[in-house]
Amino acid sequence: MIPVYFNWSGGKDSSLALYYLLQNPEFSVKALVTTVNEAHQRISIHGVRRELLHEQAKQIGIPVHEILLPDSPNMSDYETAMNKGLQPLLDQGIRHCAFGDIFLEDLRKYREDKLEEIGVKAIFPLWKRETGELIETFIDLGFKTVVVCTQADKLDESFVGRTIDRDFLNDLPDGVDPCGENGEFHTFVYDGPIYKQPLAFELGEKVFRTYGKSTESEDDVCGDSTERIPGFHYIDLTIIS
């Protein structure tokens, strides 16, 4: 069997891709690789607490391999941290990795190009599958997932904290991908066929955050040209012990 590490976000696409990979006798998944914001102790982008990540790994039965990132890293910081963080897996002879990406061509090319530099081949179990079909399959398989983050200009805060079911899908506005593949929303999976038992958690506070980067120049010494990307709605999840 070919040893593989899986790039794990804790969300629905990761879970479904891992499900399919575990059904394939050609591969053996050795680790769940997750980037964690070191300052906030949360999964990058999704904002889920680190202890919930560890509980996921425990219930799946595959060890988590964390790569710690600084707060708001630039691309150079990110790539340096990734290369350093992956080295222990490369030292074990793992030369394949898997992702839950579905149709973003530029993201796939970026991943493949960077991995080629370190001698790793990427696998995409969900690639080019129709997203409406994928989310229906996800629900039919018995996966349960809660929305932990939405892009505010795509989905309002009422969607944060909801479990994805057919009512949720029916409520999505036109133009929002049912798998959130364009970044419209992110999720945390707490039950399903890859879990030994469901994760117990409770919903906490909702918060709104915006992020931006300075584009200051010599003609803009006050930094008024700061470029902002859309805000995001988050909900905190806390584990129930």
Image: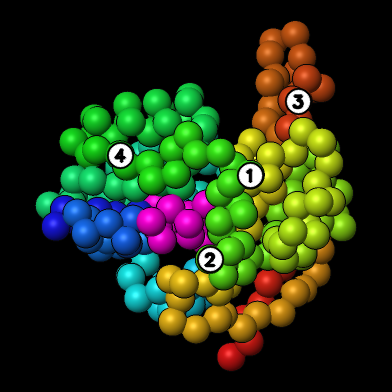
Q: Residue at x 31, y 51 (%)?
A: 85
Query: How many C-alpha atoms fall within 10 Å of the one at disc 3: few (<14), some, or many (≥20)?
Result: few
Specify the farthest residue to the top. Answer: 219
Residue 120: x and y, percent? 22, 39
Q: Which residue is mark 3?
A: 226
Label 2: which secondary element: loop
Q: Quadrant of the N terminus?
A: bottom left
Q: Residue at x 52, y 52 (%)?
A: 13
Residue 46: x and y, percent? 61, 55
Q: Nearer the viewer, residue 188 or 234?
A: 188
Q: Nearer the viewer, residue 85 or 163?
A: 163
Residue range corresponding to the magenta coloring: 7-20
- Inspect the image, locate mark 3, and give the three-letter code of the amino acid beneath it: Thr
Q: Residue at x 80, y 69 (%)?
A: 205
Total numbered labels placed on residues in the image: 4
Which numbered disc covers residue 132?
Answer: 1
Residue 20: x and y, percent? 38, 56
Q: Are marks 3 and 1 in contact (CB under 8 Å)?
A: no
> On screen, 238 above or below 140?
below
Tell us which disc is closer to us: 3 or 4.
Answer: 4
Q: CA distance from mark 2 to mark 1?
A: 14 Å
Label 2 or label 1, whichever comes before in sequence order = 1
Q: CA distance from mark 2 to mark 4?
A: 25 Å
Which numbered disc covers residue 141?
Answer: 2
**Quick check: is 161 in the magenta stretch?**
no
Label 2 or label 4, whichever comes before in sequence order = 4
Which numbered disc covers residue 122?
Answer: 4
Q: Are marks 4 and 1 in contact (CB under 8 Å)?
A: no
> On screen, 8 above or below 56?
above
Label 4: which secondary element: strand
